[in-house]
Image: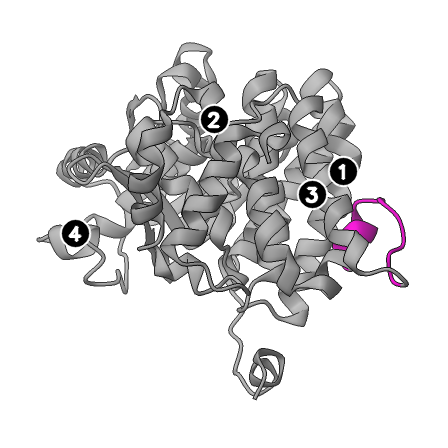
Amino acid sequence: MSINQNRQHMTHDFRMPSVFRFGVGAFAMLAKEIEMLGARKVAIVSDKGLEKVGVVQRVVDLIEPLSVPTVTYTNIAGEPTFQLLQDAVETLQAEKCDLIIGIGGGSALDVAKATAALCGKSNLAPYLSGEETIESRTVKCILLPTTSGTGSEATMNAIFGDEEQQVKRGLVSPVFLPDAAIIDPELTVSCPPRVTAASGVDAFTHAIESYIAIKSTPLTKVYSEKAMKLFTSNITGAVHNGSDLEARIGMSWVSSLAGVALANAGVGAVHALAYPLGGTFHIEHGVSNALLMPYVFEVIGKTCTKEMVDVASFLQLGDFKSQPNEALKAVVNYMHQLLDDLDLPHTLAELDIEEDSLPMMAKQAAKIDRLLSNTPYQLNEQKILGIYQSAFKGREGI
């Protein structure tokens, strides 16, 4: 029985945040959501940068009329580690908060939702190692993204660096979905070009990987498709003219729609190969995905020709129905061009990664079966090493 026949006989769950508020000015609805959740003490989880520019204070000011005590946790700088997560859980557990508000990029949102899920658990070790799934949470959670990329406000994943193992690992639990996701595109307007580009391509990676994923369904594909169509018409404006509110609105939709697709269909090989770049070399997640995507799809795209014809159409690259094998070439060319257009690096060498590190990276990536098994192409360690070698040399070296 083929994969597609198997899919027809599966039972499919579809999950989203309980409340999903989207639009310019949606930030003002935060107070109403706090009231509806009946919060008695609120923790605001964010990062140093947003604290510095006053965004955290805006949240505090919004809550003040409710006469609900607030505490802030803003120890996040860069991509979070399990050590930082443990610190956040210990700190906010001691504060006895019953609602955690995460505001920021993917790092802050991942810390917020994982902390909400882990508060009250006496032993964190089996959850952090992945031996046990977090089945319930007692602390409420609201998430507000300030970047358009991870879609963390709509996913069941949270990504952390494992400092001992020098890798990045994903925790996955249905309880990571927040009680409310509030997406206000105005919060993304001050996001700098490099972050806008990297996070934007991260969202595109979610959309295209979830579209071809083995776990995809007709419903998840609707979200993936819409995200890809909006991406191609909004990413350049958002990066190179950050005050273009229409482009920011478009990219906020891309991020959230792709996040919903990711939450339900999952992602695949691009993310698996990106993990060692983040865990060992501390390369930003969006930059890792953006750089690796064309080299990965050059290989795995051969097994999903029909989907590549679809994607080429979504990205306005042309109609390849009569010459389906040309669609993959057009999509990969688009991915390479994207790196140029958004001023993102093209090769692993540009990131100061040594060529002799590639076998170790391939060994690490080959172990990420959760993602590789969702890819419609069987990648082993040798094939993964080949992809890294192509990404090291760059297009000219292939």
Numbered range of the magenta stretch: 310-321
Name above or below for residue 311 compared with residue 244.
below
Foreground pick, 4 / 107: 4
The residue under label 4 is which amino acid type?
A: Gly
- What separation in Å lies between label 4 and label 1 (alpha carbons)? 43 Å
Residue 77 sits in quarter: top left
Mark identifier at residue 332: 3
Q: Residue at x 30, y 35 (%)?
A: 279
Foreground pick, 341 / 154: 341
Q: Is residue 4 left or right of residue 136?
A: right
Q: Which residue is mark 4?
A: 120
Q: Within the magenta stretch, is there residue 109?
A: no
Quarter of the figure that contains the C terminus: top right
Q: Which residue is mark 2?
A: 62
In the image as oriented, which residue stretches furthest toward the top?
Answer: 52
Question: Mark 4 or 1 closer to N-term?
Answer: 4
Residue density around tag 1, few if under 14, some if 14–19, many if 20 or more, within 10 Å: some
Q: Is residue 237 left or right of residue 100?
A: right
Mark identifier at residue 232: 1
Residue density around tag 2, few if under 14, some if 14–19, many if 20 or more, within 10 Å: some
Question: Mark 2 or 3 closer to N-term?
Answer: 2
Foreground pick, 163 / 87: 163
- What separation in Å lies between label 2 and label 3 (alpha carbons)? 46 Å
Q: Within the magenta stretch, is there residue 315?
A: yes
Residue density around tag 3, few if under 14, some if 14–19, many if 20 or more, within 10 Å: many
The residue under label 2 is which amino acid type?
A: Leu
- What separation in Å lies between label 4 and label 2 (alpha carbons)? 27 Å
